[in-house]
Every structure is written in structure tokens, then in C-alpha cells.
Image (cartoon, rainbow, N blue to C red):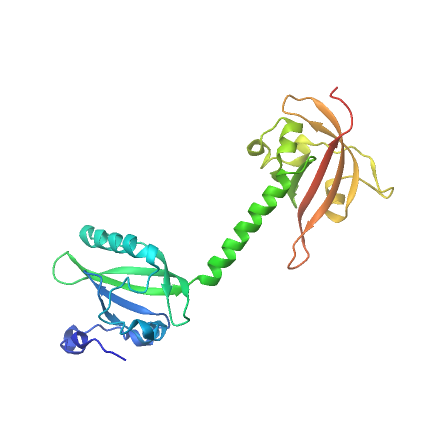
């Protein structure tokens, strides 16, 4: 393990009081040129051996190629401005032999005068979190594309009956835009008639939250016209705990506007 000789020769009264090797997360210091001058054991353990010594290397040697120029330019601009550095996210080639995503929390190193002498950095691996968020984003986009392709109008509500999502067919049927509908209570635009649901119960929001059912309703359009619709609903269940989080409703017009 290479030790920062400059730090080792610092007089005791001027040495940092923080023992960085006790930090559980990788800790690195860079000077104003972007050269790594100090690192703790967690950072050294993270560093891929094929990249040589960490201390004395450029802070951008471990970055993905498409991030190097942008990152170095941003760092030099930060050194010139002296502003408090924000948290950044970078792809770093580490001991795993792959590029992983790290959030980097930074603070300025200032010695004599106001001019910054470098930055301190703590690294947090957020690869799995970011992958999960990206997968969730792709899933949401896929589901949005699927619902947009439906010929029938679809309205999704939360457990309180507040509209959370509609597809274009619902916009066309109601005359309301998605932005106008979202946040409204479903009974504001879709008063439920007291029609039997499966011969067992009266169709209501409470029933729709409990079991799949169908019945008749009156859709109030944006122009305050009334349209009779057949409505088929099903409760939306949380896949993790099975709790009801809302209602999915499919609407089909059954007669002309009156």
C-alpha cells in the first residue's frame, strides 16, 4: 500500500485529526490539478490493481472514457470558481473489473488564503439503486405505451378514488385532458349508478376496491354532457404485500350523447 509521504512528514500540530482509514466508505483527496494525494484503505481496496498506484495518479484515470473530458473540465472550472462542489455521479472502473456507478460527495480543501487547494471526496456505490430505478423507468414507459394503445378508455385511481392516470381513449371519450383529470375524484366525472354488480352487490367505489365487477355509469364530459358507459373494474393489488392500492377501470360507450 502506497502512503502519502507528504502527509507523513506534516508536523503533528498540523496533521488532520480525522483518521481516514477508519472511514467505512472510500475517501480520496485530490489537489487543484486533479492528482490524487491521499486515500484511505477502503479507496485503495476499491482500486483495480491493473491501473497502478492510486496515489499520484490522475483522478480521471478510472473514469469511463466518455466522462473523462467533461469531468476534468468541470473540476478545473470548480477550482477556478472556488464554489462549494455539488454531489456528482460517475462511472468508475473498480476492483470488480467493471464500471460501477458512484455518487461522490465532495468538499473543498483550503489552506492559506481563499484559493482552493483541492477537494475531499467520499464515494458511495449506487449501482444497484440506479439499475433498479432505470428498470422501473423502463417498466413505466412500457406500461404507458401499452395503455396508450388500448382502444377502450382506461382510468386508474388510488384507493381513495382519486384519478392517477388515464389513456388517450379516456381523454377522447370525456373531453378532459389527462392533466385535467389527474387529481380529480372519479365520481366527479363518473357518477356510478346503483346497478347490480354480478347480481350480488351494488357497484360502488368500495365494491370496486374489493373485487372485479362491472356495471353501468354516467360519464360527465368536459362540456357537461352525459354519456352512458359500461364499466369494468378490478382492484389494483400491491405485488409485495397484496394490499389494495387503487382501481383500474375500463369504459365502453353504450349509447349516444343525450
Q: Which residue is drawn at 54% across and 50% down?
A: 138
Q: Is residue 163 visible?
A: no
Residue 248 image offset from top left, x and y in percent: 69, 43
Q: Residue furthest top?
A: 258
| Horizontal side of residue 86 vs 173, given as left or right | left
- Relative to 242, does residue 96 appear above or below in the rendering? below
| Horizontal side of residue 207 vs 16, given as left or right | right
- Relative to 66, does residue 257 appear above or below in the rendering? above
Location of residue 113 by image quarter: bottom left
Q: Can residue 246 be seen in this view?
A: yes
Location of residue 239 by image quarter: bottom right
Q: How many labels does the image show?
A: 0
Residue 193 image offset from top left, x and y in percent: 78, 32
| Horizontal side of residue 251 vs 78, given as left or right | right
| Horizontal side of residue 187 vs 92, given as left or right | right
Residue 5 image offset from top left, x and y in percent: 18, 77
Residue 187 image offset from top left, x and y in percent: 68, 34
Location of residue 92 by image quarter: bottom left
Q: Which of 190 and 47 is in front in this view?
A: 47
Q: Which residue is drawn at 45% across and 62% down?
A: 127
Figure quadrant of the N terminus:
bottom left
Q: Which residue lies furthest to the right in this view?
A: 199
Figure quadrant of the C terminus:
top right
Q: Which residue is drawn at 27% across and 60% down?
A: 107
Amino acid at each position: 500500500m502506497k502512503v502519502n509521504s507528504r502527509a507523513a512528514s506534516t508536523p503533528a500540530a498540523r496533521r488532520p485529526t480525522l483518521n481516514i482509514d477508519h472511514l467505512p466508505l472510500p475517501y480520496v483527496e485530490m489537489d487543484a490539478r486533479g492528482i490524487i494525494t491521499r486515500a484511505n484503505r477502503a479507496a485503495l481496496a476499491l482500486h483495480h490493481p491493473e491501473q497502478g498506484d492510486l496515489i499520484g495518479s490522475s483522478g480521471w484515470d478510472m473514469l469511463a472514457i466518455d466522462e473523462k473530458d467533461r469531468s476534468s473540465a468541470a473540476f478545473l472550472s470548480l477550482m477556478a470558481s472556488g464554489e462549494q462542489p455539488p454531489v456528482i455521479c460517475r462511472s468508475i472502473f473498480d476492483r470488480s473489473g467493471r464500471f460501477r456507478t458512484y455518487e461522490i460527495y465532495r468538499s473543498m480543501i483550503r489552506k492559506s488564503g481563499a484559493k482552493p487547494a483541492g477537494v475531499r471526496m467520499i464515494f458511495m456505490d449506487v449501482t444497484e439503486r440506479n439499475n433498479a430505478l432505470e428498470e422501473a423507468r423502463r417498466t413505466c414507459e412500457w406500461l404507458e405505451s401499452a395503455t396508450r394503445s388500448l382502444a377502450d378508455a382506461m382510468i386508474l385511481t388510488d384507493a381513495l378514488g382519486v384519478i392517477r392516470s388515464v389513456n388517450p381513449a379516456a381523454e377522447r371519450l370525456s373531453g378532459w385532458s389527462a392533466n385535467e383529470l389527474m387529481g380529480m375524484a372519479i365520481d366527479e366525472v363518473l357518477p356510478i349508478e346503483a346497478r347490480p354488480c354480478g347480481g350480488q352487490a351494488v357497484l360502488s367505489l368500495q365494491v370496486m376496491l374489493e373485487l372485479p365487477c362491472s356495471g353501468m355509469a354516467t360519464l360527465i364530459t368536459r362540456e357537461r354532457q352525459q354519456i352512458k358507459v359500461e364499466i369494468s373494474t378490478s382492484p389494483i393489488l400491491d405485488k409485495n404485500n397484496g394490499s389494495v392500492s387503487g382501481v383500474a377501470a375500463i369504459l365502453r360507450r353504450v349509447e349516444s350523447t343525450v
